[in-house]
Image: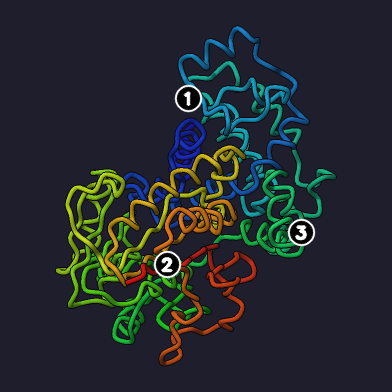
């Protein structure tokens, strides 16, 4: 029995996410998936992101019905040939921990369709999940997959209030779809109500947002792409209809998909003559900075050569120079008057877009990344000209990666001070569409998913004394 292209693609993507460091959002835009029809691409996206958002709920249902468990010897043999990320798998005390990655992936795909996609016939969800296991050379598990999925029903007591409802209605149980230790951190940092809002936001598909001027807006309308004004920034627009990837502007790299919070971060850097974006990929912020500083030289540094090469194609602006390098071992001696440090982080402010993060992340990752962030920001301070400014930002909700990093770097250097970022908020010609006070925590900027209509970002502005 053939497997539909959508489910085959979803299976491959989820398996890669389960067994490697791959991100679903990137794989869904790969060349192979791009060949799917719009309908198949839409279904593959729905299955992939739905499984990742609701994984803990799906696993609870699957575990309740698993009756056949592979032997320890077989599980060990399979894991030797197909290693899985231990941190992305259930606990060994859980019956699912002994299932092969291919098997649990097929079960999750089938369960998600049965419980959350009303228009998918049950027989299609079950039969194709069985076929996925067979095609993955796990035929011995086909009977178990068939039996488990036939026991799972949308009217299951633990999910009857959620199955068949809209995503917004399902969000009442959003807290249970996040690791408890992470929710507890947010409750301590932001309060219980805000933590609930964050979790609910994470369970909904985020808007597709672009940055555009009036001329481009009119062109997109002529190409049957429907857009609506953004809710945070004047030049941000939400795509509500049509296929943006088929437009001339997208093909010619004249626009990029970029969250409103991310756009706002780029606008905070201000103007300078020598500008460094030291953690630049994928390049959305670099592009805005370069457009705001057309007469300036913008150096976009990216640690990984492959991502740097991609940036050269995605940011084809004459004042941008992309280099592969590490700010901690600066390959040339230049002092900059503006530096953006958009530091690598846990990404807990982007779980709506990258739900796999919440299943991979461990508490110790936060302190590990904090040490890395301190190294990067310290190196940036050493390449800043007197009177120059550094914008430090992350897409993390964790104070250790944000305020604590700034505090430690300032403590080690008496020649820097924190500026009040409120004064840098873009107010000109109504650029900022929301209440500025809602974005400010002390001297810092903080956007919170579910409170603001965007991903979670932190930003601090540091100035070097003359």
Query: Where is the C terminus found, in terms of image quarters?
Result: bottom left
Q: Would you call the spot at circle 3 few (<14 residues within 10 Å), some (14-19), or many (20 or more)?
A: some
Whether residue 450 is situated above or below residue 125 in the rendered picture: below
The answer for how far apart the CA atoms under marks 3 and 1 are is 36 Å
Residue ranking furthest to the top: 73
Q: Which of marks 2 and 1 is nearer the N terminus?
A: 1
Q: SS of the residue at dot 1?
A: loop
Q: Which of marks 3 and 1 is nearer the N terminus?
A: 1
- Give coordinates of residue 4: x percent, y percent: 47, 41
Residue matched to label 1: 136
Q: In percent of the image, x 54 and y 44: which residue is there?
A: 356
228 to the left or right of 147: left
Q: In percent of the image, x 64 and y 46: which residue is there?
A: 121
Whether residue 137 is situated above or below residue 127 in the rendered picture: above
Q: Can residue 115 be seen in this view?
A: yes
Q: SS of the residue at dot 2?
A: strand
Residue matched to label 3: 172
């Amino acid at each position: 029995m053939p497997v539909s292209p959508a489910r085959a693609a979803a299976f491959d993507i989820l398996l890669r996410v389960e067994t490697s460091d791959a991100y679903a959002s990137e794989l869904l835009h790969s060349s192979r998936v791009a060949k799917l029809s719009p309908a198949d691409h839409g279904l593959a996206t729905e299955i992939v992101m739905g499984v990742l958002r609701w994984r803990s709920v799906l696993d609870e249902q699957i575990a309740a019905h698993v009756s056949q468990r592979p032997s320890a010897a077989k599980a060990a043999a399979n894991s030797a040939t197909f290693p899985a990320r231990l941190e992305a798998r259930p606990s060994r005390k859980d019956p699912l921990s002994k299932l092969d990655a291919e098997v649990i992936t097929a079960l999750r795909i089938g369960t998600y369709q049965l419980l959350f996609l009303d228009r998918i016939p049950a027989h299609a969800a079950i039969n194709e999940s069985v076929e996925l296991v067979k095609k993955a050379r796990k035929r011995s598990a086909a009977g178990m997959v068939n039996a488990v999925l036939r026991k799972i029903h949308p009217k299951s007591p633990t999910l009857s209030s959620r199955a068949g409802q809209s995503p917004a209605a399902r969000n009442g149980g959003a807290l249970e779809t996040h690791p408890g230790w992470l929710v507890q951190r947010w409750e301590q940092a932001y309060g219980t109500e805000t933590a609930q809002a964050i979790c609910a936001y994470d369970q909904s598909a985020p808007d597709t947002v672009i940055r555009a001027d009036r001329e481009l807006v009119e062109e997109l309308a002529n190409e049957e792409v429907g857009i609506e004004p953004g809710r945070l920034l004047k030049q941000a627009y939400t795509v509500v209809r049509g296929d943006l990837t088929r437009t001339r502007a997208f093909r010619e790299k004249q626009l990029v998909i970029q969250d409103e919070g991310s756009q706002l971060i780029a606008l905070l850097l201000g103007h300078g003559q020598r500008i460094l974006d030291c953690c630049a990929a994928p390049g959305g912020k670099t592009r805005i900075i370069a457009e705001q500083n057309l007469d300036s030289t913008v150096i976009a540094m990216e640690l990984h050569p492959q991502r740097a090469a991609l940036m050269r194609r995605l940011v084809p602006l004459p004042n941008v120079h992309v280099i592969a390098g590490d700010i901690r071992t600066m390959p040339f001696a230049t002092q900059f008057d503006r530096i953006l440090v958009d530091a690598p982080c846990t990404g807990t402010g982007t779980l709506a877009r990258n739900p796999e993060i919440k299943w991979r992340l461990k508490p110790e990752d936060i302190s590990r990344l904090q040490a890395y962030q301190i190294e990067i920001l310290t190196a940036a301070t050493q390449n800043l000209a007197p009177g120059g400014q550094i914008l430090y930002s992350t897409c993390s909700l964790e104070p250790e990666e944000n305020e604590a990093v700034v505090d430690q770097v300032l403590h080690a250097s008496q020649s820097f001070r924190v500026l009040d970022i409120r004064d840098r908020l873009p107010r000109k010609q109504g650029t900022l569409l929301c209440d500025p006070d809602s974005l400010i925590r002390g001297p810092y900027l903080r956007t919170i998913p579910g409170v603001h209509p965007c991903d979670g970002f932190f930003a601090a502005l540091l100035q070097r004394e003359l």
